[in-house]
Amino acid sequence: MVVDGKPGFTQESFEAIKKEAENHSIYCNLVIDEMCIRQQVEIDSQKNVHGYINMGAEHCYDSDDIPLAKNALVFLAVGINGYWKMPLAYFLIDGLGGKERANLLKEAINLLHDTGAKLQSITFDGANVNTRMCTELGANFNYEN
């Protein structure tokens, strides 16, 4: 199987999980992390330009003033009843709000559900934008004594 490695959801990853889920129950955790990347523009041998924000094939950028990507937002499935990790998606971003992250998380959950895998938990750091993502999904962090 060949993976093209382009930003967005990686269909090959979901197909691999689905194939395994046909043989036995798969329980997994979904990890979401954002990491800094070097801001740099490159042109490959096919004259494709890389380095700008990129949310995957389903998004089109027609503007000449697309910002450089500062971060990569990564979605990773980790096996609970097996020893495996599978990158599900990555997005090259320059900041992404809670609502947009919530939409991406819902899409990742739906795609993972379609494989037959059983998602048990979601892990992410305590960044404010992740708290806003949870609030967008209905979480309430207002604790009363």
Image (cartoon, grey):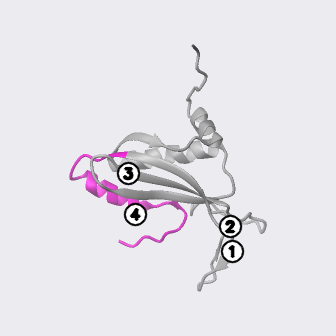
Q: Residue placed at 69% from the left, 74% from the top?
A: 41
Left or right: 108 with respect to 78? right
Q: Which secondary structure, mark 3?
A: strand
Nearer the observer, disc 2 or disc 4?
2
Mark 2 and mark 4 residues within 8 Å of each other at the beta carbon: no
Classify residue 104 as left or right of residue 29. Answer: right
Q: Quadrant of residue 50?
A: bottom right
Crowd rating for badge 3 (residues with CA inside 10 Å; few <14, some 14–19, many 20+): some
| Front-most of residues 29 and 109 | 29
Callout 3 touching callout 4 (CB < 8 Å):
no
When the figure is inspected, residue 126 is found, relative to residue 1, above or below; the finding is above
Q: Which residue is mark 1?
A: 41
The one of 143 and 63 positioned closer to us in this rendering = 143
Secondary structure at badge 1 equals: loop
Comparing marks 2 and 3, which lies closer to the viewer? 3
- Residue 144 lies, with reference to residue 60, above or below; the image says above
Q: Which mark is residue 78?
A: 3
Say which residue appears at 27% left-offset and 51% top-offset: 82
- Asked whether residue 111 appears in the rendered view, the answer is yes
Q: Which residue is mark 2?
A: 52
* Badge 2 density bin: few <14, some 14–19, many ≥20, Cα 10 Å: many
Position of residue 63 measured from the top left corner of the image (x, y, whole percent):
76, 65
Amino acid type at image mark 3: Val
Residue stretch in magenta: 1-28
* Circles 2 and 1: CB atoms closer than 8 Å: yes
Q: Using the numbered discs, state the Cα–Cα distance from disc 1 to disc 3 in whole angstroms.
A: 32 Å
Labels 3 and 4: the sequence-earlier one: 4
